Image (tube, rainbow, N blue to C red):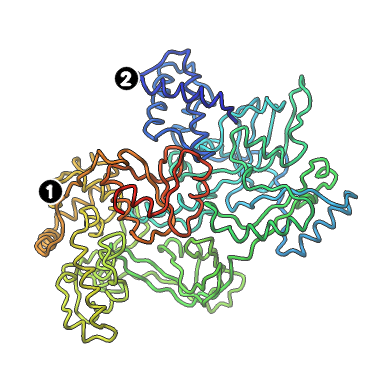
Amino acid sequence: MYSPEEKQKLQTETTAFLKSKGATSIGLNKIEQLRNILRFHEYRYYILNDPWLADNEYDQLYKLLEKTENENPNCITADSPTQRVAKGLTKSFPSAPHLAPMLSLDNSYNSEDLIDFDRRVREITGIEIIEYCVEPKFDGASISLIYENNLLTRAATRGDGVEGDEITTNIKQIKSIPLSAKFSNYNLQQVELRGEVLINKNNFKKYNEQQTEQGLAPLANPRNAAAGSLRIKNPIEVAKRSLEAFIYHISYFTSIATKKSASDVQQHSSMIKMLWELGFRSPQKEMKVLTGIDAVINYCNEFEIIRDELPFEIDGMVIKVNDVLLQDKLGMTSHHPRWAIAYKFKARQATSKLISVEFQVGRTGSITPVAKIEPVFIGGVTVSSISLFNEDVIQEKDLKIGDTVLVERAGDVIPNIVKPFIELRSGKEKKIFFPTHCPACNSILYKEEEEAVWRCLSFECPAQIVERIIHFASKDAMDIRGLGEALVQKFYEQKLLLDIIGIYKLNFDAIGTLDGFGKKSIENLKEAINNSKSQPLHRLIFALGIRFVGETTAKALAQCIHHLLDLRNFSLDDLQNINDVGPKVAGSICNFFSHQNNIEMLQQLEELGLQLKNVKKEILTSGNINQQTFLFTGSLQKLKRSEAENLVETNGGIIVNGVSSKLHYLVVGADAGSKLEKAKKITSIKIISEDEFLQLIGKE
């Protein structure tokens, strides 16, 4: 999309703008220059996944443009980066006709189906060997985009294939979709594109973690999450979902009358390349052009093996005749084009029987219904339990005990009941009644007005106590190895462990009388408990299980205090001045520190040797990795990941989250994956082993 000369020019201009840190606005003659700079960095971030700017630097330039445009509203253009975020709510989603029908694809499930498809193509075209284009079948929500005179003018859902819902405002929140693209360079005036909106696995996981921290139900799977996001009426909420879009087809176009006919739409592979060069995230990297159906079958089989390594969900491959003239000759039925077919991977859905629903109590008192189904093998695992999240999910899906249900498991995402087969009901199915009292302590359940979750508010609820102990000892909290869920439950039932303080007062003589506990296992548990006392303050804060306080918030809190009990004196306003702390989080923290029993627990933990002070790390600034950036991938053999990252930080280095040109060192362990492959393509990154890392910091 950008030539080396253009990249150099834009980077030089970026540096110049960033150096003028005191500038609050710019001259009108520089507005378009700044817009181009922001578009360039959006492209590097959202399409190439290789940013050249830190987030705060991008924000600085964005705010500069925003302020200048606000002062000069007549200069705002429809494709300015500031015009993605809409003001106010979308009142409705009117219908929008597609320029060309959005047909479904015919499906195939084995090599015989593909061979039969190839036979039909050869018979109709009269050509013996066909060239095919093969690309992933993205598991998201289908969209249609229309560009006129280079500007994005309309976006719509698939709908019934003839018309869909107009969702232009929401689509503008997806930063991998350009607001303008230079189709005129290819002699194209009006273009209709097809694509798929999705959420990548990491963003889906992060979003669900945030939902859980806030006491909200997580989303069921990436596909449904993407489809649902497109119909959210608040575009700001849409932007929070971190949606992405792959654009994989040009379904309709008109040429600029005064110029020659467009030549880059004669082959499907050329279209994909053109879209990539125009700044769209097309499947250019994943696509292959292959001759003959045998090569197609081999590629489909190879891709199915690596599907779980991809950052996004796919459920198959799409095979298309590459030559557009041949596509026209093959034509289409009323349902699907004859020149394309979807090869579906092995099913990750299955049917089962809903046997019962159990209600589990979480550490914050949340009541979670869990469906017990007849065991069924899906996606490499046997599934017998599935979370139903809350009462609303049961009602919305109209689930009943005894239902035959469709179960889905996508990648490493949690299993989900898609729907019951209502037409298979015999009349013997039973309604699911949500409890009014806690199943563990019989306290009356309570639901806040804005939440979907019922809660037990009893602090003495045994189920909550056990879950709090399990969380406290977990890997990301105090990391007490060996004290897992089953052992905590066993110790609680034996009255050997009744609260968090009890971890540090365990009667090891009594434990020694239990089956399975020898001298070695007891010594290991003692050592793990003792080691936990030196965990840094932010881990202890996270381990306490304060509602809405995740790992990131725990680190932010730890940085603002000298001693954990200092938080007793923080007001709601004080807390909300801390990064990542909003009103709900602040209220929860204040509530925790207002209870005297919590204060007494913390005082006792300190007396037992735990670290309640914020011990500042001594950072070396004279070492040979000062201000150098590091990222670890794969399994380390000599260090835990947290230990390795701590060594970087104490030696003045910086830990980053992803591979980009700003990364100095990628430290590679066993079974390294996509990060290593990506780093190999960036010559400035030094790829080193764990031993080389230890030598670098002087530990070997």
At numbered mark 1, what does the secondary structure look like: helix, strand or loop?
helix
Q: CA distance from mark 1 to mark 2?
A: 37 Å
Quadrant placement of the N terminus:
top right
Q: Position of residue 44 (x, y in %)?
A: 51, 35
* Residue displayed at 58% across by 40% down: 281
Q: Nearer the viewer, residue 113 or 390?
A: 113
Look at label 1 and name its amino acid: Asp
Q: First in sequence, mark 1 or 2: give its number.
A: 2
Q: Position of residue 632 (x, y in %)?
A: 40, 51
Q: Nearer the viewer, residue 519 or 420?
A: 519
- Crowding around mark 1 (Cα neighbors within 10 Å: few <14, some 14 to 19, many 20+) is few
* Residue displayed at 58% across by 49% down: 141
Q: Which mark is residue 22?
A: 2
Look at label 2 and name its amino acid: Gly
Q: Position of residue 630 (x, y in %)?
A: 37, 45
Q: Nearer the viewer, residue 676 or 151?
A: 676
In this rendering, does residue 323 appear at all?
Answer: yes
- In this figure, which residue is indicated by the disc labeled 1? 566
In this rendering, does residue 90 appear at all?
Answer: no
Query: Left of 207 or right of it: where is 182?
Result: right
Query: Left of 416 or right of it: where is 489?
Result: left
* Residue displayed at 63% across by 33% down: 277
Q: Position of residue 583 (x, y in %)?
A: 26, 45
Eyeballing the image, is 156 above or below 676?
A: above
